[in-house]
Image (cartoon, rainbow, N blue to C red):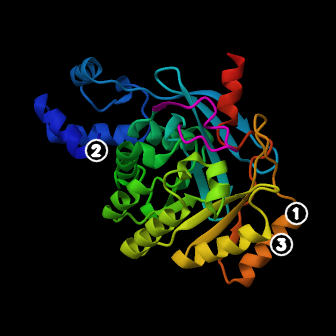
Amino acid sequence: MTLPEIEAEFAALGEPKYRAKQVFEWLGRGVRDFEGMSNLPKALREKLRENYRLYAPKVLSKQVSQIDGTIKYLWELYDGNAVETVVMSYQHGNTVCVSCQVGCRQGCAFCASTIGGLVRSLNASEILDEVLFSQLDSGKKISNIVLMGIGEPLDNFDQVMRFLELVNDPMGMNIGMRHISLSTCGIIERFDDLADRDLQLTLSVSLHAPDDETRSRLMPANRGRGVDKLMEACKRYYERTGRRISFEYAMIDGVNDTEYHARLLAKRAKSVGAHVNLIPLNHVEEREFRPSTAGHMKAFIKILEDENVNVTVRRRLGGDVDASCGQLRRKMQKNL
């Protein structure tokens, strides 16, 4: 709940308004039960316990990279389901990559998260808990958030928007929108809804192919939409918000890393003023795809740069801790 919502609840309970603020502050500190709210009267704590649920996620697995310190969490939720969260350290601060669903319905052919389909969407508090308890457990102050874990954020639109409101609250974690990236496989029906909110976050589009034939093979979400319509939605979003879009592009050997793909990608990116972020593919055991060779990657980058496209290559972090989203949860499922 937001602070005004808690204030309304407390008014209905006949409690003073300032008590709501105390509870909101306790929640922002990661209190695990109502008894921990030590400045509340015992009678109020009992009333809260009788009327409301407070649940903190449990660490099922924690892997720490011996290479770069990346931390991979597998959190158990209140119903026994599990999601993954990754904490990564950069020069500009610590970034947490959060999940927004248990599983995923989008079916991307190279991804571990979608194996087994969608179980359910997370509520806003569960997404918030990933940030809060990753910070508390790791001891690393979180300054940036990427919604790029398990699930499709725009397929859980309302709860993701509520999460953004909560994590941005000055009395909560107070993480600014400019420090948040939201990644989508291209649920273009929600682009205008997102633009309506005029949030200062970064919209990252998981493109992975600039043509319909390749993209539809890799990403079922492209079918019935198409790259042209996706580009139209991206351009409209950029024009309405003034926020530059980022194209996420996993480099897959022999699939989307040819000269043809590079030149078409350059054309697509320039048409909407997008930044291109190339991602060396993380191999998934159940999938056939392999990462592009160093030679193909180099040639691909040169074409983009020659076309004056702003391009970067994502640092590979946590390669020794199943850092690719969905892998740790998948291992847990296999062992059940």
Quadrant containing the N terminus is: top left
Q: What residue is rendered at 43% in x and 61% in y?
A: 177
46 horizontally vs 161: left or right: left
Q: Earlier in the sequence, mark 1 or mark 3?
A: 1
Q: What residue is rendered at 76% in x and 77% in y?
A: 303
Q: Secondary structure at mark 3?
A: helix
Q: Secondary structure at mark 2?
A: loop
Residue marked by disc 1: 294
Magenta span: chief secondary structure: loop
Q: Residues within 10 Å of mark 1 (few under 14, many from 20)?
A: few
Gap in Å between the C-alphas at discs 1 and 3?
9 Å
Tell me: residue 113, above or below residue 233: above
Q: How many marks?
A: 3
- Nearer to us of marks 3 and 2 is 3
Question: Mark on residue 299?
Answer: 3
Q: Earlier in the sequence, mark 2 or mark 1?
A: 2
Residue marked by disc 2: 2
